[in-house]
Amino acid sequence: MTKGYWVSVYPADSTPERLAAYDNLAGPAVRAGGGRLLSRGDRVVAHEAGITQRVVLIEFDSFEQAVAAYESEKYQQALEALPDGFERDFRIIEASEHGLTGGPTMAEH
């Protein structure tokens, strides 16, 4: 089984005060779903077309577990606590089984 990750990129105007209600519900929901916070940093160095916005990275033991945690009732309640009109770039991704060498190349995907 390959690990799964939540990757969230928050807009520049996302101050902690605006997200307090969400954070209070999301943390316990993520932990209940088996998630582990790897990064919740505002320190970002952007290259190429990147932008310097807050990035949150959460790890799960499997991709399926990551999807299930997002779809859980507890996490859906946390989403309802986000401020009206709030948008973020949120993705659930599967870890590569091949690492940086061996296996299919980036061009083959």
Image: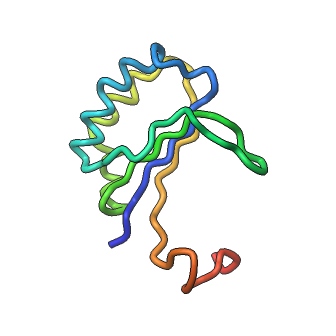
34 is higher (above) or lower (below) than 79: below
Instruction: Name the residue rendered at 58%, 40% in the picture.
Output: 89
Instruction: Name the residue rendered at 37%, 64% in the picture.
Output: 3
> Residue furthest toward the bottom?
102
| Residue 69 percent across, percent down from the top left | 31, 47
On the rendered structure, is 23 left or right of 90?
left
Instruction: Name the residue rendered at 38%, 24% in the picture.
Output: 22
109 is higher (above) or lower (below) than 8: below
| Residue 38 percent across, percent down from the top left | 40, 47
Tell me where residue 23 sits by quadrant.
top left
> Residue furthest toward the left?
32
On the rendered structure, is 2 left or right of 48?
left
Q: In this figure, what is the number of numbered marks?
A: 0
- The colouring scheme, among rainbow, by chain, secondary structure or one colour, is rainbow
62 is higher (above) or lower (below) than 11: below
On the rendered structure, is 1 left or right of 15?
left
| Residue 17 percent across, percent down from the top left | 45, 13
On the rendered structure, is 67 left or right of 51?
left
82 is higher (above) or lower (below) than 103: above
Instruction: Name the residue rendered at 34%, 34% in the picture.
Output: 76
Tell me where residue 109 sits by quadrant.
bottom right
Q: Quadrant of the N terminus?
A: bottom left
Tell me where residue 27 sits by quadrant.
top left
> Residue furthest toward the right?
48
10 or 90: nearer the eye? 10
